[in-house]
Image (cartoon, rainbow, N blue to C red):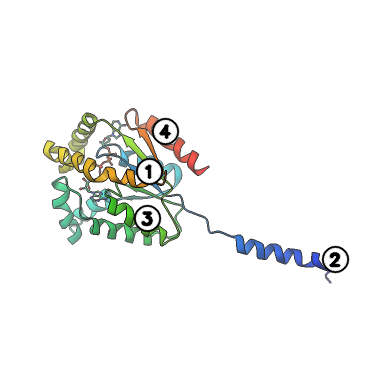
């Protein structure tokens, strides 16, 4: 038999606490990160380390596009001509791909966007996609690397990766120009919300990784 307290109000306190708890319960928020930088700045390299450290869901538009090309899908065949020329694949194609990838991964602790967004239109579309899931971009880590170093890294990578977009100096120049003319606008877009941190992308892979982790830990709290 339940004992009654002398004050009847006390009998309702546990019930009130439960109701208070339910009303104030918020689903666990994701932590969403954009790794930003020019072609060859080390986005793919650092992404691999960050996903193993933090368990992010890695979403690299470059990797998805290359896998579409390898599988000779319709999308891949369309994307190849743009990539080989050092141009961006049209926004509608890439935004559609990212939308499907977000929808296919419910319940992840956060996404690491690598190589996306690359235009202001892609950034705005990403914000809308995340907002439709009650989420947002929490942090943009922008790696800065001098142009001569970018070219050296692309040449180095072309020797082992077989990536045709890395080997041709004209294509390299085009990719860097596209970054300046179209992609830098993404950093401006997120700067207005105070979410961009710029880091030196020159140095050892481990040192750069440490500075990225420092910023993520500071933001995550
Ligand atoms: P991506 O696949 O995104 O590749 P990336 O920008 O060239 O390289 P990343 O910065 O990841 O460099 P990585 O770590 O490998 O794009 C390729 C193409 O896909 C684009 O040009 C475009 O056509 C298309 N595309 C992709 N996303 C798109 C989008 N959203 N919209 C439209 N089109 C899109 O490093 C490069 C090299 O440097 C490696 O060899 C690495 O070992 C080396 N390296 C890395 N860090 C180093 C360090 N600290 N020191 C020395 N070397 C280092």
Closer to viewer: mark 4 or mark 2: 2
Q: Is residue 183 above or below residue 203?
A: below
The residue carrying mark 1 is 191
Percent position (x, y) of residue 102? 37, 58
Return the disc, 2 or 3, that comes first in the chain's sequence.
2
Snapshot quadrant of residue 167 = top left
Q: Residue furthest bottom?
A: 1
SS for tag 1? helix
| Residue pointed to by mark 2 | 7
Mark 3 = which residue?
127
Tell me if 11 is positioned left or right of 173 in this view: right
Q: Is residue 85 above or below residue 146?
A: below
Crowdedness near tag 4: few (<14), some (14–19) or many (≥20) residues, C-alpha within 10 Å: few
9 left or right, relative to 21: right
Q: Nearer the viewer, mark 3 or mark 1?
A: 1
- Checking the image for residue 74, the label placed there is none
- Tell me how far mark 3 sits from mark 4, CA to CA: 26 Å
At a point 46% along the width and 35% down the height, the residue shown is 214
Asked whether, in this view, residue 45 is left or right of residue 69, the answer is: right
**Pointer 4 or 2: first along the chain:** 2
SS at circle 2: loop
Q: Residue furthest top?
A: 203
Image point (28%, 60%), residue name? 96
Instruction: Using the rendered view, name the quadrant where residue 139 is placed.
Output: top left
> Badge 4 is on which residue?
211
């Amino acid at each position: 038999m339940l004992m009654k307290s002398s004050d009847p109000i006390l009998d309702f306190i546990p019930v009130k606490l439960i109701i208070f708890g339910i009303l104030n319960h918020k689903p666990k928020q994701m932590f969403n990160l954009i790794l930003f930088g020019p072609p060859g700045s080390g986005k793919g390299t650092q992404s691999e380390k960050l996903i193993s450290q933090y368990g992010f869901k890695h979403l690299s538009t470059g990797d998805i596009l290359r896998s579409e090309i390898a599988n000779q899908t319709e999308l891949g065949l369309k994307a190849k001509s743009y990539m080989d020329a050092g141009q961006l694949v049209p926004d509608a194609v890439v935004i559609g791909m990212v939308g499907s990838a977000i929808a296919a991964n419910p319940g992840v602790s956060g996404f690491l966007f690598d190589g996306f967004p690359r235009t202001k239109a892609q950034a705005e579309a990403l914000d809308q996609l995340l907002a439709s899931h009650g989420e947002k971009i929490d942090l943009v880590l922008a790696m800065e690397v001098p142009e001569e170093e970018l070219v050296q890294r692309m040449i180095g990578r072309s020797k082992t990766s077989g990536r045709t977009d890395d080997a041709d100096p004209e294509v390299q120049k085009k990719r860097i120009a596209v970054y300046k003319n179209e992609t830098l606008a993404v950093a401006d877009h997120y700067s207005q919300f105070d979410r961009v941190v710029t880091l030196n992308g020159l140095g050892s892979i481990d040192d750069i990784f440490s500075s990225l982790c420092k910023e993520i830990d500071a933001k995550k709290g």
